[in-house]
């Protein structure tokens, strides 16, 4: 009996060793499998990175359309394929058609603006020299003015090229979107199955993505459009040449962070000053910074925060990051990256840190 009692701790000891070996083997297999998945993900990313803007565009449209899709197919019992095609056609009419008209309007003026960019350089040089003579100071050298003019001339086609993407990208956006809409429920259920998080955290992640996409996909263009409309009124009153061209430039520039619509009304004021239309130049600056800038600040920090409860700093820095990573579609997904990063930190704390604290407290 004593021998048997002595063997019980030994049996427990050997069993604990076996269990630890099993746990270690499982961890090794898990790490190896994760490395394999990561390597395959890197290979796929490198080979398909040119399609990332199309994928992000499809995700954006899916976030805007999936609720309507579910309502029509599940409540109204519409056929999925036809419903998806109908919603895609509606998005083309509502979203792509206005963008296409804007692109057509600006494309006819872009070559003119580039060819006459020297006029803006000369105007800037004259304004600077007048100020230097009047106040006996040195503001900018001619070389710096020429470099600034070249930067302006080069930035316009780049901005337009990033804004109005190729037909191929648009095709793949809708190609991907069709299958996302038709298989929306299966896709969302798969996220719960394959993402290694609690269901509540997967739901939080999905809600965050949906909220941020809607906030930026709707908020940023609407804010820029409001600035452009207000700017158009001022351009017409002040007698700006080609006011609708500058309306389009203001709309595009208004979507960019920090400088925003100033890329439109500051050059206009310089042109006014160079042409000895001083009061128009002063009025353009006052109207731009006072009225157009106020529209931007009020709407960006109130309407967008109300739509998605997005902090203004997340929007500003997210747009900067997104433009560098994804081009123009980064206006939407840059802030999303920052929001997801902070959300993942909270999820990690909820999934692992809190659990580890509970284990430590119990032990």
Image (spheres, rainbow, N blue to C red):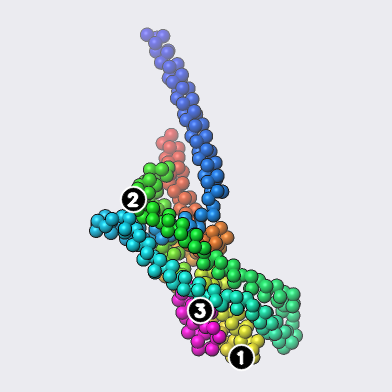
Pair 3/1: label in front:
3
Are the two marked residues, 3 and 2, in contact with CB atoms closer than 8 angstroms?
A: no
- Residue 314 seen by the camera: no
What residue is shown with label 2?
Answer: 185
Q: CA distance from mark 1 to mark 2?
A: 61 Å
Rendering coords of residue 304 (x, y %): 43, 67
Secondary structure found at label 1: loop
Mark 3 or mark 1, which has the lower sequence index? Answer: 3
Q: Residue at x 41, y 36 (%)?
A: 362
Badge 3: residue crowd in 10 Å (few <14, some 14–19, many ≥20): many
Disc 2 is placed on an element classified as helix
Q: What's the mark number on residue 247?
A: 3
- Residue at (55, 48) in percent of width and height: 47
Instruction: Identify the residue at image location x=50%, y=76%.
Output: 105
Q: Nearer the viewer, residue 203 or 53?
A: 53
Q: Which residues are magenta?
A: 222-250
User: Rounded to the nearest whole Å, what is the CA distance between mark 3 and mark 1?
Assistant: 21 Å
Determine if the magenta segment contains residue 244.
Answer: yes
Q: Is residue 296 above or below residue 69?
A: below
Question: Residue 277: which numbered mark, if any?
Answer: 1
Of residues 180 and 12, the one drawn nearer to the viewer in this rendering: 180
Could you say where residue 11 lies in the image, as x and y percent from the top left? Answer: 43, 17
Quadrant in which the N terminus is drawn: top left
Q: Residues within 10 Å of mark 2 (few under 14, many from 20)?
A: few
Q: From mark 3 to mark 2, how far is it between C-alphas?
A: 41 Å
């Amino acid at each position: 009996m004593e021998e048997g009692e002595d063997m019980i701790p030994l049996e427990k000891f050997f069993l604990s060793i076996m269990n630890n070996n099993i746990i270690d083997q499982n961890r090794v297999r898990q790490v190896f499998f994760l490395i394999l998945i990561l390597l395959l993900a890197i290979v796929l990313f490198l080979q398909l990175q040119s399609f990332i803007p199309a994928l992000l565009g499809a995700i954006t449209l899916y976030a805007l359309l999936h609720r309507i899709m579910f309502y029509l197919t599940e409540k109204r019992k519409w056929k999925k394929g036809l419903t998806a095609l109908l919603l895609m056609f509606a998005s083309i009419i509502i979203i792509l058609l206005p963008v296409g008209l804007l692109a057509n309007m600006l494309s006819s003026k872009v070559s003119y603006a580039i060819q006459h960019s020297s006029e803006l350089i000369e105007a800037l040089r004259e304004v600077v020299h007048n100020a230097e003579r009047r106040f006996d100071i040195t503001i900018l050298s001619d070389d710096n003015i020429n470099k600034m003019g070249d930067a302006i001339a080069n930035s316009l086609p780049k901005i337009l090229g990033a804004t109005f993407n190729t037909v191929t990208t648009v095709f793949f956006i809708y190609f991907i979107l069709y299958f996302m809409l038709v298989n929306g429920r299966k896709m969302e259920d798969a996220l719960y199955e394959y993402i290694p998080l609690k269901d509540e955290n997967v739901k939080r992640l999905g809600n965050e993505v949906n909220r941020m996409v809607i906030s930026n996909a709707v908020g940023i263009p609407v804010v820029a459009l409001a600035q452009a409309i207000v700017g158009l009124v001022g351009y017409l009153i002040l007698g700006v040449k080609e006011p609708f061209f500058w309306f389009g430039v203001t709309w595009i520039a208004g979507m960019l962070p920090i400088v925003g619509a100033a890329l439109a009304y500051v050059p206009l004021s310089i042109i006014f000053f160079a042409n000895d239309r001083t009061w128009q130049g002063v009025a353009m600056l006052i109207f731009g910074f006072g009225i157009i800038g106020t529209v931007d600040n009020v709407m960006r920090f109130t309407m967008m925060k109300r739509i998605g409860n997005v902090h203004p700093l997340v929007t500003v820095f997210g747009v900067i990051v997104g433009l560098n990573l994804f081009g123009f579609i980064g206006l939407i997904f840059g802030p999303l990256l920052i929001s997801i990063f902070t959300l993942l930190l909270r999820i990690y704390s909820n999934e692992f840190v809190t659990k580890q604290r509970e284990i430590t407290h119990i032990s």
